[in-house]
């Protein structure tokens, strides 16, 4: 994993927005693979919300199913990068 994970991706365009954050269409710089980049600010989140988010990320790491997005990377202290 790169020192700054976002150095590995190009952000292309806003794909959607919700109460937890924004999702952008992105592309991996070295493979060209198209990905979804989800940005969720920690500011303003309760401790319970942050614990739930951490648990969701841990569960998603283990899931592999064609109808569920695949979790690729999570920058330290940041939002997951999903495929």
Image (cartoon, rainbow, N blue to C red):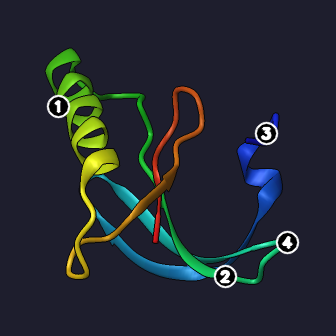
Distance in Å between CA atoms under marks 1 and 4: 32 Å
Q: Is the residue under label 3 in contact with that under label 1 (CB below 8 Å)? A: no
Residue depicted at x 21% and y 22%: 51
Distance in Å between CA atoms under marks 1 and 3: 25 Å
Mark earlier in primary sequence (3, 2): 3
Q: Which mark is residue 52?
A: 1
Q: Which mark is residue 4?
A: 3
Task: Kindly report which numbered mark, 1 or 4, lies closer to the viewer in this rendering.
Answer: 4
Q: Is the residue under label 4 in contact with that under label 1 (CB below 8 Å)? A: no
Q: Which mark is residue 33?
A: 2
Mark earlier in primary sequence (1, 4): 4
Task: Kindly report which numbered mark, 3 or 2, lies closer to the viewer in this rendering.
Answer: 2
Q: Position of residue 72 (x, y in %)?
A: 51, 56
Answer above or below: position of 64 versus 39. Answer: below
Quadrant including the N terminus: top right
Disc 1 secondary structure class: helix
Q: Position of residue 19 (x, y in %)?
A: 24, 56
Residue depicted at x 64% and y 76%: 26
Q: Position of residue 80 (x, y in %)?
A: 46, 49
Mark earlier in primary sequence (1, 2): 2
Q: Is the residue under label 2 in contact with that under label 3 (CB below 8 Å)? A: no
């Amino acid at each position: 994993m790169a020192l700054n994970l976002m150095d590995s991706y190009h952000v292309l365009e806003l794909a959607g927005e919700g109460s937890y954050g924004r999702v952008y269409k992105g592309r991996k710089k070295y493979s060209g693979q198209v990905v979804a980049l989800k940005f969720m600010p920690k500011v303003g989140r309760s401790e319970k919300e942050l614990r739930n988010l951490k648990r969701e990320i841990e569960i998603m790491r283990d899931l592999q199913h064609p109808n569920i997005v695949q979790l690729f990377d999570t920058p330290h202290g940041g939002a997951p990068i999903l495929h």
